[in-house]
Amino acid sequence: RIVYVNGEYLPEEEATVSIFDRAFLMGDGVYEVTSVLGGKLIDFDGHAKRLARSLSELDMAEPCTMDELLQIHRELVARNEITDGLVYLQVSRGSAGDRDFVFPDPEVVKPTLVLFTQNKPGLDKDPKALKGTKIITVPDIRWHRRDIKTVQLLYPSMAKMMAKKAGCDDAWLVEDGFITEGSSNNAYIVKGNKIITRELSNDILHGITRAAVLRFAAEAQYEVEERNFTPEEATQADEAFTTSASAFVMPVVEIDGVTLGDGTPGSVSLRLREIYLDEMKKAAV
Ligand code: PMP
């Protein structure tokens, strides 16, 4: 695999980052994951804009222009012959050659930019989408700037492991009695014609897929309600699903051991998945 690190395309074995890099020592970095379908990038613009926002919220410099970022994405997709897969991008505050809580001077220390691809043939044909996923709820004990897409993913990883140990696919996180979001996706329930998902705030990541799906849902005449919902309300819903750039719209068929509907993916979830994939493939760059 050819990867990108600070201006160079290299075989992955030859790519290096300093042990003093602040993403490594302090989780001082942000990331984006953009999917590739048919060799093209899905919603690159949305990811580039969110990246710029994450960097700005953390007073981090942009490592290059967004146009250059697009070129790097395309170059990696081409060099690795990716038809379906993902491009992972990470920007860290860089390395000052030592460990210090104080941010290094941005005039002296430049951000570290790393990108690599993941080859995932048939990414949009995951059989899980036809079977549906099982969810458990766990406490949300993350920090309170979840709107910034940082590489601090320890608790989401732990939540995912708790789900696995419980024989489930993923975890939804609960704070003050309400679902915030999934370990690596936004969470939704469906009641009749109504799609319910938590409103945007610093409590959740502003999903790029969420924005597109809610737009398509409104266009398809579904009612969209952005509000908090409890695990109890979720278990009584007709359907549930998650959204993320790497799994698109993923139906949920079980929450905390309670089967939703007849235990198969709901029609609204499947329809939104189809619309999302159709429309986003058409708009891919
Ligand atoms: N919430 C969290 C916590 C996530 O990690 C992700 C995926 N990175 C999402 C939501 C979904 O965001 P997106 O649709 O932009 O992938």
Image (cartoon, grey):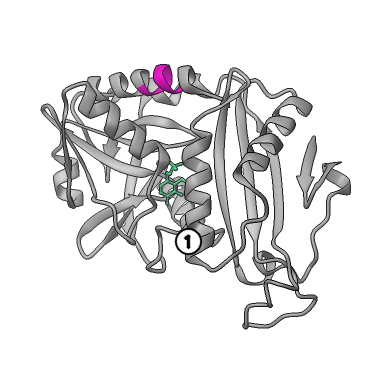
Q: Where residue 257 sits in the image (x, y, percent)?
A: 26, 42
Q: Where residue 201 sits in the image (x, y, percent)?
A: 29, 58
The residue indicated by pointer 1 is 155
Q: In the image as oriented, which residue stretches furthest toward the left?
A: 192
Would residue 86 appear left or right of 14 to someone viewing this image?
A: left
Would residue 60 appear left or right of 169 to someone viewing this image?
A: right
Question: Residue 219: within the magenta?
Answer: no
Q: In the image as oriented, which residue stretches furthest toward the right?
A: 14
Q: Residue at x 24, y 27 (%)?
A: 217
Answer whether residue 153 is visible to the viewer in this image. no
- The quarter of the rendered structure image containing the C terminus is top right
Residue type at the position of mark 1: Tyr
Q: Residues within 10 Å of mark 1 (few under 14, many from 20)?
A: some
Q: Where residue 193 sits in the image (x, y, percent)?
A: 12, 27
Would residue 233 appear left or right of 272 to someone viewing this image?
A: left
Relative to 104, is 139 above or below?
Answer: above
Answer whether residue 73 is visible to the viewer in this image. yes
State the residue in front, 30 or 137: 30
Main SS, magenta residues: helix
State the residue in front, 166 or 87: 87
Label 1 residue near ligand 1, CB within 8 Å: no
Relative to 17, is 115 above or below?
Answer: above
Question: Residue 278: within the magenta?
Answer: yes
**Magenta stretch bounds:** 276-280
Q: Residue at x 29, y 19 (%)?
A: 271
Q: Residue at x 44, y 23 (%)?
A: 280
Q: Where residue 228 sits in the image (x, y, percent)?
A: 18, 52
Q: In this figure, what is the number of numbered marks?
A: 1
- The quarter of the rendered structure image containing the N terminus is top right
Disc 1 secondary structure class: helix
Q: Residue at x 78, y 52 (%)?
A: 6
